[in-house]
Image: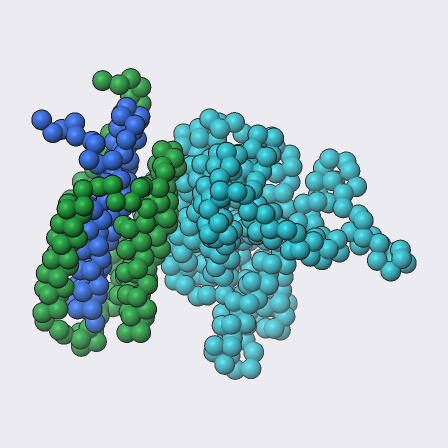
Amino acid sequence: MTLFWILACVTIPAALTVILHRNPVYSALALVFTLFQVAIMFVALDAHLIAFLQIIIYAGAIVVLILFAIMLLSLEPEEPGDGRSSLRAAGWGAAALLGLELVAIAAVFPDTPAAEKPLPEGYGSVAKIAERLFTTHLLPFELTSVLLLVAVVGAVVMARRRTGP
Amino acid sequence: MTEHYLVLAAILFAIGGLGVLIRRNVIVILMSVELMLNAVNVTFVALARQHGSMDGQVIVFFVLTVAAAEVAVGLAIILMNFAQRKTINADEIRLLRG
Amino acid sequence: MEVLISLAKVIFAFVIVLQLTLVLLWVERKGSALIQDRVGANRANLFGGLLPFNLGIVNTWMADPLKLFHKEDIVPADADRFLHWLAPWIAIFPLFVTFTVIPFGDVLIAGGYTINLQGADLNLGILYVLAMLSMAVYGVIVGGWASNSRYAFLGGVRGSAQMVSYEIAMGLSLVSVVLTFGTLDFQEIARAQGDLLFGVFPAWGFFYQPLALLIFFIAGMAESKRAPFDLPEAESELVAGFYTEYSGSKQSVFMMADFVEVAIVAGLVTTLFFGGWQVPWLYRDGFHFPGGFHVFVPSLLVTVLQVLSFLVKLFLFCWLQILIRWSLPRLRYDQLMDLGWKRLLPLSLANVAITAVFVLLFDGKTVW
């Protein structure tokens, strides 16, 4: 439980840095940090494989791509407050409402201590997850490969187009 | 235990949503969306643990692949758009608005 | 006591890395001199030249680090000071923690304790290594970006593209190794290599996965950003690439990160393909040579021999990388991407497929 409170105290400021920092490079690095915290949460929740995949795929590949794009565009830090302030206020309000609603839903969640239910043998192990993945979830798994192929083709087509419309 | 993680995930999701709403830099918006996806992943894993079932973890696996595809295509669109219009401000990208 | 033992193991792993980086620095100086027919670092005249042998190594071991850590720390104007400071530490931290999962011996049986000689026992060791190595990219990107210099920036961009590209081939070559041994645990993989092929040869991973060894070694060298893959820090093009604007202790941290990466690649090659700490035919109770010949060796000595064997192999593969570095010219950028994406990636995919078929047909290792 101590671990959870430490994680919560570190993750929320990191997540706020992602969306509030004016320099996108800092945002991206804060995102990496947040993803790391989420990976630790996964470990705490007995999802070791998922935790490592989270770091390898998310932190190791996806955010590197984002950083790469930020650097290729050589972005300047955004000027503060030149947006429409009424829209920004509405954004804060809507997000606060959303947050309150979700927290309320989560808080009324029927509380059954996790310790009561013993976890099955090999919970979260590579073998067990692979078994689920290749039996029950085989069709979505195969569809994922199609999705990735489409994404690759799409990205390549867009990157290769040289002339404007 | 589970509901603690659910509340944390809810807060993360709201922060991500806030980022999408108030920022105009498309790349930051993309990162906010990643934040929201992660919040959902935490929920999946926490509930999977609660029920002692591994399907929640398998779904996180799918979310990871979708996120990877999303970022690859999204960044390609952003870069192409920047090359042609020299902007990554979401307010100024309005090609699809009639 | 348990905590003390774990602490001692982690410290031992750290000491190996730290000492190895210093030794490698010296070996590289002397080795490159040997290859280029020079004398190399030899200006250490201790005790007024009374010693019969040359102590050039002292120069590299003590004088050099001392000098580096006392140099002025220069941060360029308009650099991002915080990230400029942070980058070296991001670069080296994941590498240091990677080394702790590589086993440097079997078990040490002493005083009623059976100690697993591995910094951290992790049953998902290979995934852990991949995760940590993928974090090492950030030091390069952030260092290049924060310096506010064209050269550093170009080096950072090149470095990140190169490391992300070669990680894929590296990961896939490890997949076939995992398929062969059926585990992600380094210690278990090392133990499995104690068996014998045909009752004669030690069953090292190299015999099962020669292609994976080749791919992993090439990709690992590309990950460590050294010649022939040193485009991110190409001195003839980019001054020093992503750490052009670093000086003093921060620069030495970057240099150390390079050597730690060399050590990690050597450690992984040793553990996955060359038996790790295994000494051929040496078991807990002594040597069992083929033909039924048996020599008793005390358990403690067995452990010492195993740790020595690991260190010798580790050093050999470090030396091999240094040899390659000083022998081959740098690749062109398109050749680099070509090799990574069009050669290594399809090869490693094919290797995974073939390995999977073999595992299915012959139930893994019983193929021999």
C363 or C356, nearer to the observer: C356
Q: Is residue B12 above or below residue A109?
A: above
Q: Residue at x 76, y 46 (%)?
A: C41
Q: Residue at x 87, y 60 (%)?
A: C47
The tint chain A carries is green
Q: Position of residue C139 (x, y in %)?
A: 47, 48
Up-down: is C185 above or below A60?
Answer: below
Apparent colour of chain C: cyan
Q: Is residue A157 left or right of residue C241?
A: left
Would residue B40 be seen by someone viewing this image from the given angle? no
Front-most of A43 and C181? A43
Q: Could one spot residue C94 in this view of the protein?
A: yes
> Residue C220, position in %: x, y?
50, 43
Viewer-side residue, C55 vs C340: C55
Could you tell me residue A162's position as x and y percent? 31, 19
From the top left corner, tell me how far across and down residue A91 is, in percent: 15, 49
Q: Determine which quarter of the picture holds residue C19.
A: bottom right
**Residue drawn where x is 29% and y is 21% of the image:** A161
Q: Residue at x 77, y 36 (%)?
A: C37
Chain B shade = blue
> Based on the displayed image, in which of its 4 quarters is residue C296 positioned?
bottom right
Render colour scheme: by chain
Badge count: 0
Q: Nearer the viewer, residue C201 or B11?
A: B11
